[in-house]
Amino acid sequence: MIRPAGRFALVLHSHLPYVLRHGRWPHGTDWLCEAVAESYLPLLRAFERLESDGVPARLTISFTPVLAEQLADDGFRDEFRAWITGRRAQLERDTKDAGQSDPRAADLVHTWKGWLDETERHFNSLDGQLLRAFRGLEERGRVEITTSAATHGYLPLLSLDASVELQLRTAKAAHRRHFGREPRGIWLPECAYRPRYEWTPPIGRDAGRIRSLRLGLEEMVARHGIRWFTVDSHVALAGDPLSIYRNFYPSLAALRGYEERFPQQPRMRSSGRSYRVRSKGAERQAVALVRDARSSLQVWSRDEGYPGHPDYLDFHRRNVANGLRYFRVTGPGVAEKDKQLYDVGAAERRTEEHARHFVWLLGDTLERMRSSGISDPLIVSPFDTELFGHWWFEGPLFLEHVFRHLADSGITAATGSDEADAESSRDEVSLLEGSWGEGGDHRAWLNKHTEWTWDRVYDAEGDVAATLAQIAMRGAAAPASVDRALRQALRELMLLQSSDWQFLITTGAARDYAERRFATHYVELKRLLDLARRTLAGAPPDEEDDLYLSVMEKRDRCFPDVDASWFAAPR
């Protein structure tokens, strides 16, 4: 049966927090090296093979500015080559152990050696310049590269629009520097959206006391020429507009009353289209691409999706010393000690089978959309890039098969901007506040375990604002030494605002590391602001101050063009 034509927009989001010069294994630069080896390089090879074979594959991939800064850093290339050397040494040790236990294990170690050799050759052929390779794909019309907030700050919960503006201005400048053009789309961190309304900080000393009119995020991105973003389906689709808020953690009392503030929210009927988003009273708007729940669930769900198949490489059972993996999923609920050895051939054959099923699923979903009255249906499937390769090792090969089958399906592969440009008129709607996290709200980032972090974020934002106001009152430009300290302070503020710290604390995946990193950036920010104020008061930096600032600039050397004027209310 020939499925009806329609459009499919795959949107990948590449992000890791700033880990360079902040530890290695188990938490630190090994995260970055694994993502490059297991996700970014394999995906790049898959896209290049599709291009070489003339397969009309188009997709969107974002690189968060903080990830791009790390991939472009000379220090990363040194770290990655050291990581390769360490993995190769461990494989040599594993060869001896495997040979004494199971011939199949020895064969598997040999396979991993070949994979590591290929990874090293590919990395060296690019001279470690991954961003340049992806930029080439975009220049040849194969992908669209989009941006995100500078350090993946959780935008709806930042207390000042000046902070959101800093995240966006920094992101835009970094994108131009790395990719040579303006970003046209943005991945809102954690797909977290907030409309325009009078906002009260949910926790901290100002909770329930200070109220300010906050701009909708669609207004703020549109001010920077960004046309579109992606939202999760529950933020957009018809249903009880307050269903995701009623069980909020008690500290979120400021968000209660949403129903009274917005009693007549225009509601959508389908995720099979894109929509113009405008908050009430807003002058600017952007296009929202709505996540299709059915296709997304089939891919990312560990219980219902493809990655949980018994043939695929198990993510969790690892060599505790270095993270190497030798076992397959085996089956649902199978204890780690009972996992069976991985069979590469069986896993690769399964990816082709699953790709065929996924393309069938897309066709069936498009047909259902047509039956519901949508004449030109759209499926938007947004995922973390690291799902493909790092979490689901076979994921890049799966995607390659998907695009090969799409070429014969009548389904058009599109980028986000293809869709944003496709219609001159479309329905205008308002969106609910929410995210793609647990519960569809903010609870994965604001809860009893992370309240203390937001108290410090809000204190840091207020301290930066007060320091800049003090400088503005002088009526003259700040001395170069003050500007230098302020620029580093803004880097520390943005690193402090990364949504990763709250998420890692909430999930317990790397709680100690996240808490330590958060506390470190907070302390350094306060010291840098103190240095700026002392200098402004007439006490020039001494030798110790200068050494400290130099150390900070070398350790957290992201965003070289950040400017103190970027921390300001949007104009």
Image (cartoon, helix red, strand yellow):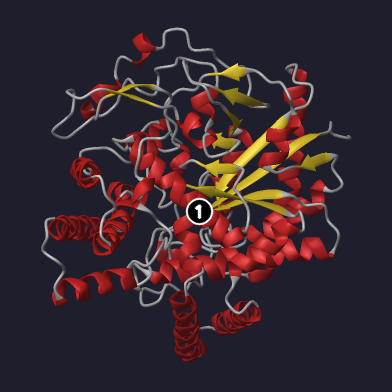
- In x, y percent, where is residue 501? 31, 52
Outermost front residue? 476
Q: Residue at x 55, y 60 (%)?
A: 177
Badge 1: residue crowd in 10 Å (few <14, some 14–19, many ≥20): many
Q: Residue at x 53, y 12 (%)?
A: 266
- Amino acid identity at mark 1: Ala
- Number of numbered labels in the structure image: 1
Look at the numbered disc 1 and give the secondary structure of its residue: helix
Residue nearest the observer in this picture, 414 or 460: 460
Q: Is residue 522 left or right of residue 494?
A: left
Residue nearest the observer in this picture, 66 or 85: 66
Looking at the image, is 153 positioned above or below residue 380? below
Looking at the image, is 169 positioned above or below residue 369? below
Looking at the image, is 52 positioned above or below residue 507? below
Looking at the image, is 89 positioned above or below residue 425? below
- In x, y percent, where is residue 518? 25, 55
Write down the quadrant of residue 413 in the picture: top right
Note whether residue 219 is visible.
Answer: yes
- In x, y percent, where is residue 170? 44, 51
Q: Is residue 313 left or right of residue 134?
A: left
Quadrant position of the C terminus in the picture: top left
Q: Is residue 250 left or right of residue 35?
A: left
Quadrant position of the N terminus in the picture: top right
Write down the quadrant of residue 42 in the picture: bottom right
Residue nearest the observer in this picture, 569 or 123: 569
Task: Check disc 1 and report the residue beneath it.
Answer: 173
- In x, y percent, where is residue 241? 44, 16
Note whether residue 311 is visible.
Answer: no
